[in-house]
Amino acid sequence: MKLLFWQPWLIPILPLVGGLINGLFGKRFTKSVVASIAIFFTGASFLAACVHAYTLLHSGADALETSYGTWISAGNFSADFGIYLDHLSLVMILVVTGVGFLIHIYSIAYMEHEGGYYRFFAYLNFFMFFMLTLVLANNYLLMFVGWEGVGLASYLLIGFFFLKDSAANAGKKAFITNRVGDFGFLIALFLLIQHFGTLRYVAVFDIVSHFPAETAAGFLTAIGLLMLLGACGKSAQIPLYVWLPDAMEGPTPVSALIHAATMVTAGVYMVCRSNAIFSRAPMALLAVAIIGTLTSFFAATIAITQTDIKRVLAYSTVSQLGYMFMAAGVAAYSASIFHLMTHAFFKALLFLCAGAVIHGIGGEQDMRKMGGLRKYMPWTFWTMLIATLAISGIPPFAGFFSKDEILWQAFSSPHSSKIFWVVGVITAFMTSFYMFRLIFLTFTGEYRGEQPKAHSAHDDHHGSPHESPWLMLAPLVLLGVLSVIGGWVGIGNRFEHFLAPVIQTVSTEQSVAQNGEATAAPVSEGEGAGESKGLENLLMAVSVLVAFSGLGLAWFLYVKHPELPERIATASGGLYRLVLNKYWIDELYSAAIIGPLVAFSRSVLWQEIDQRVIDGTVNDSAVAARDVSQIIRQQQSGLVRSYAGWVVAGAAAVVAYMVWMGTR
Amino acid sequence: MIPVSWYLLLSAFLFACGVTGFLIKRNIITLFMSIELMLNGVNLSFVAFAANLGALDGQIFVFFVMVVAAAEAAVGLAIIISVYRTRETLNVDRVNLLKL
């Protein structure tokens, strides 16, 4: 097959080149040069992604694999530097490069007054490189490289303001929490190697397609659960979600790109990529659904009470990721990826708008000190309103289509139970409520802040709340457009059909094992068309109704009766404090896990093992050597001639012995 | 033809001279010369056997010994100079800094 232009390695390498140039030499460049380099290489990467999308879609193939040589070869095992481009990775690279490109543009203006300008763009470009490696890899090992790489980039960017203790700690927290997940992922990889002898997607999925769905917990379930642990770490799901809200210490564009739109979706991507495994491990799948549902619900409740604009969005991200896991957990992988895509648009937009707000009022993040900003920053207001409508699931905005698809799948999927749907709908209500609470608190009413203090050395136009420069507004508008139309690709299940080649269908019966073939009867999701169509429309109406009632309640509480929330908060007392303090999960973790671990490390590992055993061994052997030498050195008289005498005596003895042996 | 044993006797005599000199003298340079004497005593027995057996091995060994001896002389003399500079003596018995 002749391909017009097929150099997929360009897509990840271009940002790497940009990152290297800026990282190594950026200190000497002016800000505009640094920004141009970063923009050029990300833009080129986006362009390359578009070209390859076109090529792939017109090649007639479902997936194209390109290998650039062997990376590791050990015994029967080998891993390639290979790129696997199918419809799933295509969606991912377009989202990563597209949203990433827009956020780069936004950052030019947003980061202008911050130190370490070149460092910021170098890190961002490195992040793009690793993220693209993650989604383009043709085997799990290379994916793991990207997986760790984005963790590193995320750590560097969360701790970007490293002089601030809270930022440095948040970076460490994110990194260490992710290690827990990575550990699970790594063991899953070992199990894959043990059972399949390869990590190449195509090979693994081909082998696994000969297995029937597990009815009892077997090794596929084990692999699935361990992968889920990895995904929980990266995608901030219960119990490893704690790092994401703290990650908001990073610059806002970072929150938008890494901690909302792209990196945190890596776990979702991984689960969907491994659908062949998960679909054969119903228990692992159920665990995915339960964790996703729980996370979406709990995070939404926390988001209701938060007052920091970025934290609301952070918990909202956790909650939306929970939706994606819920969808993946009911084997509706395409719905999950669909929501991933629309979420990338509107959540990036929300964060960028929040950044514009924070930027515009001089660094304040507390929503109680905002208000009435609509007249100061109309562009930000309108784009943020669009994003809010999208995330709340109000038609015809993007989030409506994807969220509705997820809820429908949760209701109707054979892998699902209705409880997921119920919780999902309640969460949708809360989502709509807390998002409009954010909008009303921020943009309506009167401005409650003080006259903002000037931030950094640049205070000529920071007198009062002001609109952002056009370089920041342009990405907002573009993302706003995407947040409106992004969901339309899902109309008539087109998105599902687009992703269909990626999803292996599994029959739940044993027949797969008997005929030994992968292609069991495909489960067509739209069967029994007439009746389920009506049901689907009914559920759609329910979710729209729920979204509007969330909006209404937010309006009632925060516009009509702004004194009510205070009263409700005091009335509910303990419950309110419980939620406000995020269920004391952080405190629980630090008391139950971190505290004992630190105490154990300090008393046993440090003072016993390290100081006594390891240092003791080294020191004692040194002392022993010294003592023995003390005795032996007596032999060293320092008289060279006496040494020579001993040598002669020794030689004479040898000669005598040989003569004696010779004469025997 | 001189019998090989004569050469060996001369060789043994040279070697013994070297050993004796090495053991009884104190001056480092004298010790050095004694070492050379021992080496050449050995060389003599090598060539004697080589001529006697009609094999070249012995002679080749002699070349090796001479090369090593030359190298040793260069390094050794450098050490001697350095020792003299720091200790201001050539008496081996007084070069005993490492002694307890």
Image: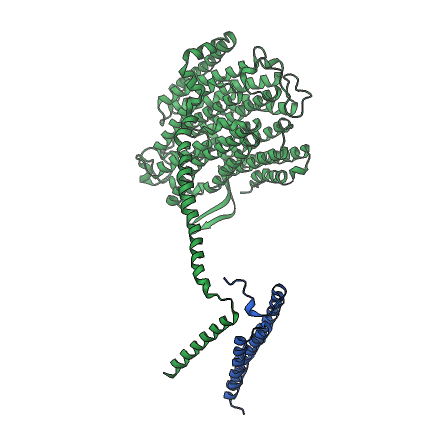
Chain colours: A green, B blue
Q: Residue at x 46, y 33 (%)?
A: A234
Q: Position of residue A22 (x, y in %)?
A: 63, 38
In depth, the one of A349 and A372 nearer the eye is A372
Q: Position of residue A648 (x, y in %)?
A: 48, 75
Q: Is residue A209 left or right of residue A146?
A: left
- Vertically, is A402 above or below A179? above
What is the number of callouts on the image? Answer: 0
Quarter residue A385 falls in: top right
In the image, taking residue A253 as reference, residue A327 lies left or right, namely left
**Residue B73 horizontal/vertical position (percent):** 60, 72
Residue A528 seen: no
Can you name the residue that lies furthest to the top here? Answer: A560
Identified at 61% across, 69% down, the residue is: B77
**Depth order, front residue of A556/B42:** B42
Of the pair A351 and A617, the residue shown nearer to us = A617
* Relative side of A379 to A633, left or right: right
Q: Position of residue A570 (x, y in %)?
A: 44, 11
Above or below residue A257? Residue B25 is below
Residue most toward the bottom? Answer: B1
Q: A643 or A616: nearer the eye?
A: A643
Can the viewer see residue A242? yes
Residue A10 sits in which quadrant? top right
Image quadrant holding the C terminus of chain A, namely bottom left
